[in-house]
Amino acid sequence: MLIYMRTSSQRARPKYLDLLRIKLPITGIVSIAHRASGVLLVLSIPVWLYLLELSLSGPQEFQNAAEITNGLFFTLLAIVCFWALVHHFLAGIRYLLIDLDIGVDKEAALEGAKWVFLIEGAIMIPIIGWLL
Amino acid sequence: MSARAGGIRPWVIQRLSAIYIVLALVLFCITLLFGGISTSSDWQTWFSMPFWNTVVIIFWLALFTHAWIGIRDVIMDYVSHDAMRFSALAIVGFYLIAMTVWMTKIMITAVNA
């Protein structure tokens, strides 16, 4: 497998990308937001582990965890993380479909990217309304 | 996924872990909505059940693996300086190992509760 990986076709590919010089079409926005949301979700892991540990530590701690999650700061954080999760999920589904050769052509790819944002809005707007 | 990462294995792991994460989250949401968990002891009991404890541990491991492959690809694409890239990968690696240790402690405590 290593020999296969080091063939010349690898060398022809662009080495690194200059983020400031790229103008993104909607498919590119879905893609970069997939990455950004993924990074954000990884950074949020300690928050969820902390709350899980606290909530499992006893009745008083369970109550404390519930109070933290009711606070405004946590609510805002939860909205951002929930958006990240929804986007990461929907864009991920789109990639899985592309793996299955669904939505690969230019037209279909643009259409798919639009649907990601449409469904995202349809999920997020009521959720934000409910949480705030 | 980055073309430079190479190999079919991370590609497969990324997709399998994604599917497991989604299924586990759906199961967890169903439990929260319909599982009748309201008190601290309901919550502790649920996490102490061997089946659910295992589902949750595998969820975290799938998540950390998914995170590693994803972040690794992002770093390899955008951090062009060799030493910076190595440092960034090392920091993320240690971060995820620390999360794994912490998660293991939480889940072992939960099963004994």
Image (spheres, rainbow, N blue to C red):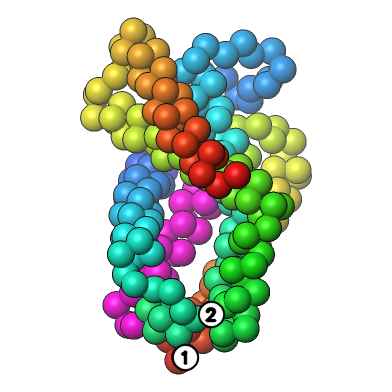
Give the camera-side residue of B92 and A76.
A76
Q: In this picture, is A30 found above or below A85?
A: above
Position of A90 compared to B72: left or right? left
Q: Do marks 2 and 1 both belong to one polypeptide chain? A: no
Magenta highlight: main SS: helix
Q: Chain of mark 2?
A: A
Q: Secondary structure at mark 2?
A: loop
- Could you say which quadrant of the image residue A54 lies in? bottom right
Residue A43 visible within the image: no
Mark sitting on residue A56: 2
Determine crowd level at label 2: few under 14, some 14-19, many 20+ residues with C-alpha closer than 10 A: many
Give the camera-side residue of A73 and A115.
A73
Position of B25 compared to A46: left or right? left
Instruction: Kindly identify the amino acid type of the residue bearing the numbered disc 2.
Output: Leu
Q: Chain of mark 1?
A: B
Q: How many marks?
A: 2
Q: In this picture, is B75 found above or below B31?
A: above
Q: Is residue B45 magenta?
A: no
- Circles 2, 1 touching at the beta carbon (< 8 Å): yes
Which residue position holds label 1?
A: B113
What is the spatial separation of the Cα atoms under label 2 and label 1, in whole angstroms?
9 Å
Q: Is residue B54 magenta?
A: yes
- Percent position of residue B28, x then y: 37, 62
- Could you say which quadrant of the image residue A123 lies in? top left
Position of B23 compared to B90: left or right? left
The residue under the point 70% across, 32% down is B80
Instruction: Kindly identify the amino acid type of the residue bearing the numbered disc 1.
Output: Ala
- Which residues lie in the magenta part? B48-73
